[in-house]
Image (spheres, rainbow, N blue to C red):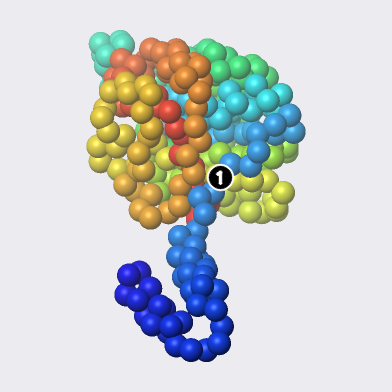
Amino acid sequence: MRILLRYATAVVLRPHGRPLASLLSAVLASLAAVAARAAPAPPQLPPLDAGTALLVLAPHPDDETLCCAGVIQRVLRAGGRASVVWLTSGDASLLDLLLIERSVFGSAAKLRALGVRRMREARAATALLGVASSAQLFLGYPDRGLARLTAAPGDQPYASPFTGVAAVPYSESPFAGHPYTAASLERDFAAILARVQPTLVLVPSPRDAHPDHAAAGLMALRVLARRGGGVAVRCWIVHGGAGWPSPRELSAGVPLTRAPLLGDLPVAAFALTPAEEDAKLAALRAYPTQMLTLAPFLLSFVRTTELFTAPP
Ligand SMILES: [Zn+2]
């Protein structure tokens, strides 16, 4: 920049008849325009008001709170609507099972019971954020199975090696009995979009390191693209790279730093109020099964900001 300025000054000092100050400001304006083109503006969220209909897509119970608890609360306080759709019920955690049940014997049935328990936790957590029970939507697809399920041809069946089922086993889901196939998942998500009629959808980033998250994000972006425009879409990330967020502890009052896996993507920071941060913490504490195994990681998301990128 200094060299460019020296060059610009040398040029404008030539006696062209145009006032020096005006030439200099024109050169600086064009340099600023070049800089602005090189760094696109952060993808700020649209205004959150009474007309906002928010849909948060969560691969697992707890993701919605980690990524978006602040936005959910702000939309509801502004008089808008907020819904959460969970693609899976978190029914593949053998570690949870070991710590809760002290045994993995008969694990398929126990993991389905864990799924039911985690859905109950998700209801309690999001109720603390203000989400109505009618806006808590569970699809019931297989935890740790979304990447393989969505990579398979549309109607190819998938059976979860954890729960032993090949169709949605939960009566809590409006889609109970639907087969575990890519086509069925996309149809069910499209049905949720038709029901919620969102103006803003927050989906997992395809850059997220968790295979369920990346697959969920790509599936959602495909379905949203088919549906056409009129909906603002932003991506969030939870598994953002080794050691992130750092430090792995409760750091209320501190902003979330950029996740390494986002690279140089422009990131918009949504600022939480202290009360929104407190409610986010309370919502996370409503997930005892997850706090048992992942507390330091979960708590490290209670910060003054939540981060969003534009879809790829
Ligand atoms: Zn997750």
The answer to which of 49 and 244 lies nearer the viewer is 49
| Quadrant in which ligand 1 is drawn | top left
Q: Find out if the beta carbon at label 1 lies less than 8 Å from the nearest ligand 1 atom.
A: no
Does 287 sit above or below residue 82? above
Tell me the residue at 34%/48% (across/down): 261
Q: Tell whether 206 sits left or right of 242.
A: right
Tell me the residue at 56%/39% (across/down): 202
For the N terminus, the image quarter is: bottom left
Tell me the residue at 68%/46% (across/down): 231
The residue pinned by badge 1 equals 44
Q: Tell whether 299 sits left or right of 36.
A: left
Q: Residue 96, position in %: x, y?
A: 32, 19
Q: Residue 259, position in %: x, y?
A: 35, 43
Number of marks in picture: 1
- Where residue 136 sits, quadrant-wise, is top right
- The disc labelled 1 sits on which kind of residue? Gln
